[in-house]
Amino acid sequence: MEEKNHEKIYITSIYASPNAITRWNLWQQLTEICPATKWPWFIGGDFNRTLTANERRSNATRTGMIDREFSNWVEQMALIDIGCSGPFFTWKREGCESRIDQVLMNARAKENYLDAVVKTLPWFKSDHRPLLLQMRTLGPTFTHQRPFRFNTSWILHEDFDRFIKDTWACNSS
């Protein structure tokens, strides 16, 4: 949990076991610690499950079904998949690819961080791609004034000469 300006934000990193019982226990523990709708919550990492059938690609003749337990848990918790930019599949092994690594958020996080984005990064010493969550709060994000920029169309305005003379005269006294 991070706190800034008395606003809390919860960020939970996940590694869900390939074992179904251990994974189910994790879903139950996360349900208990859920920050509800009062605070923004991002939860991401290796869920070891997919939410939809298109999140898997395999050269096998028959691929597994989506994990109903996982998708039901995501629905029960009212979590939203942020999506990703970059390569879609985050895991690969022996002709199979899937998107088992992802970041989910609650409605409060979506309200406060409209431009949150997850970038899927290149493979690096793992069969999982790392994920990068980038987010900014709404409102001004710069701490200093922006530099002056001259717009050439200003000189076409009928009062431009007068404005310059008046402004120059006020600032030179």
Image: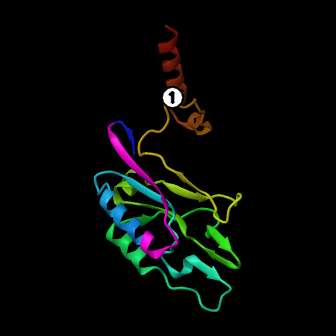
Q: Assign a secondary structure to mark 1.
A: loop
Q: Nearer the viewer, residue 99 or 13?
A: 13
Task: Identify whether 135 is placed above or below 57.
Answer: above
Quarter of the rendering containing residue 22: bottom left
Q: How is the image coloured?
A: rainbow
Number of numbered discs:
1
The residue tagged 1 is 144
Residue 51, magenta (yes or no): no
Residue projecting furthest to the bottom: 61
- Horizontal side of 105 relative to 61 (left or right) equals left
Residues in magenta, as a range: 6-22
Q: Position of residue 78 (x, y in %)?
A: 34, 67
Q: Residue at x 39, y 45 (%)?
A: 1
- How many neighbours does mark 1 have within 10 angstroms: few (below 14), some (14-19), or many (20 or more)? few
- Horizontal side of 16 relative to 56 (left or right) equals left
Kind of residue indicated by mark 1? His
Q: Position of residue 92 (x, y in %)?
A: 66, 72
Residue projecting furthest to the top: 173
Q: Position of residue 104 (x, y in %)?
A: 45, 62
Q: Nearer the viewer, residue 26 or 163?
A: 26
Q: Nearer the viewer, residue 151 or 130?
A: 130
Q: Residue at x 50, y 31 (%)?
A: 159
Q: Residue at x 50, y 68 (%)?
A: 17
Quarter of the rendering containing residue 3: top left
Q: Residue at x 49, y 31 (%)?
A: 143
Task: Identify whether 39 is placed above or below 147.
Answer: below
Q: Nearer the viewer, residue 37 or 23?
A: 23
Q: Position of residue 146 (x, y in %)?
A: 54, 32
Residue 10, magenta (yes or no): yes
